[in-house]
Image: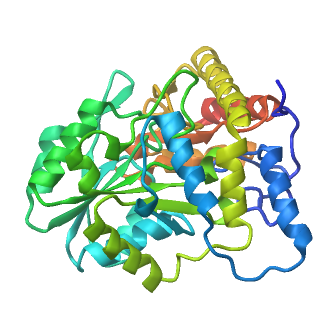
Amino acid sequence: MKYDFDTAVNRRGTDSLKWDVADNELPMWVADMDFKTAPEITEAIKKKADLGVYGYSVIPEEWYSAYIGWWERRHNFRMEEEWLMFVTGVIPAISSSVRKLTTPAENVVIMTPVYNIFFNSILNNGRNVLQCQLKYEDGQYHIDFDDLERKLKEPQTTLLILCNPQNPGGNIWSREDLMMIGDMAYKNEVVVISDEIHCDLTDPGTEYIPFASVSDVCRDNSITCIAPTKTFNLAGLQTAAISVPNPKLRHKVWRAINTDEVAEPNVFAVDAAIAAFTKGEMWLEELRQYIYDNKQITEAYIKESIPAVSVVKSHATYLCWLDVSEVAEDSTRLAAHIRKRTGLYLSAGKGYGGDGKHFLRLNIACPKSTLQDGLERLKDGILSFGK
């Protein structure tokens, strides 16, 4: 491999949200990676830092070209420049859109279990969360389209937030699934926000499908949120984009993010994104293989050493969704026990809605030595629970 993913980076004492824990603790919870980003991105940031003047920034033509080229080259989908808007993050984009496109007490549908912060974007703005619980069958999630249609038909429902690919389950939704979602939403006059932040973190040889690429209906009735941040470990740089093909809908979103003042980049945000999408491809290919290998290690270890736990079938993200229903009725207590006994810090699944209380989320985007440590702690915590 050209790039080094095996060397552990000491992030303690660096004001890291993930690593601001006790000395004996191992955090494998929040979705950021323990790898250094692509050196090509680091060089772009250093070049800007060396300038020594950190004034206001504009969005240059190269930023649009970088996004357009990446999606066309890697995802076979051509975005137009006028569709794209800079935003500081996917969640600010979603929260601003919720405020602009819905009114208080209206329903926003989410398919659960799903990224827990979606709940915040809805509830903190005085809207109602309407959960369409995914069906969990044979170790994998499927959409309950009958229930989804019922939820979308409700007169108070005006928005659907889709996670594509799905966090935490790791599903890559099929073209047929996305088509049905898009048709149902359009028929019931419900706008779709598609969060596609994990789209580049698929298994090698596996591809996701952009929601807006599926049909004219999906394209013209949707807002897509994208970013290099999960893919290249840049969350702290606050750099993302919104793609909205429909001009009327785009104007509303543009007003939303500018009213909330989340449409202006910090001095490093643009340069990092351009470097990621124009120079980071080889690094990403090696990363995807490394994460895939970590998945295989995790699945094999759990199957052999912790048979009461199973790993949900996943083809995207670096997050493993662990079914612990045979161990605990509610994983919140189990997660607390594991952390107290072993120092391993995982995410309890209850906050993700749906059947999340039966699951734990494990972040495996780390060197293999760290992963092995985490798995051994997981085994100790699981086997000692209830004793």
- Taking depth in this image into account, of 231 and 366 the one nearest to the observer is 231
The total of numbered circles placed on residues is 0
Residue sitting farthest toward the front: 61
Q: Position of residue 62 (x, y in %)?
A: 63, 58
Which color scheme does this rendered protein use? rainbow
Residue 166 sits in quarter: top left
Q: Where is residue 285 in the image (x, y as percent from the top left)?
A: 67, 29
- Taking depth in this image into account, of 216 and 373 the one nearest to the observer is 216
Quadrant including the N terminus? top right
Where 23 falls versus 15 (above or below)?
A: above
> Residue at coordinates 91% horizontally, 68% vertically from top-left?
50
Residue sitting farthest toward the bottom: 259
Position of residue 175 in the picture relative to residue 241 (left or right): left
Position of residue 136 in the picture relative to residue 158 (left or right): right
> Residue at coordinates 63% horizontally, 73% vertically from top-left?
265
Where 25 falls versus 371 (above or below)?
A: below
> Residue at coordinates 62% horizontally, 14% vertically from top-left?
304
Q: Where is residue 48 in the image (x, y as percent from the top left)?
A: 83, 66
Position of residue 166 in the picture relative to residue 13 (left or right): left
- Taking depth in this image into account, of 127 and 101 the one nearest to the observer is 101
Camera sees residue 28: no
Quadrant including the C terminus? top right
Q: Where is residue 22 in the image (x, y as percent from the top left)?
A: 81, 58
Residue 93 sits in quarter: bottom left
> Residue at coordinates 43% horizontally, 85% vertically from top-left?
259
Where 341 falls versus 129 (above or below)?
A: above
Camera sees residue 176: yes
- Taking depth in this image into account, of 205 and 336 the one nearest to the observer is 205
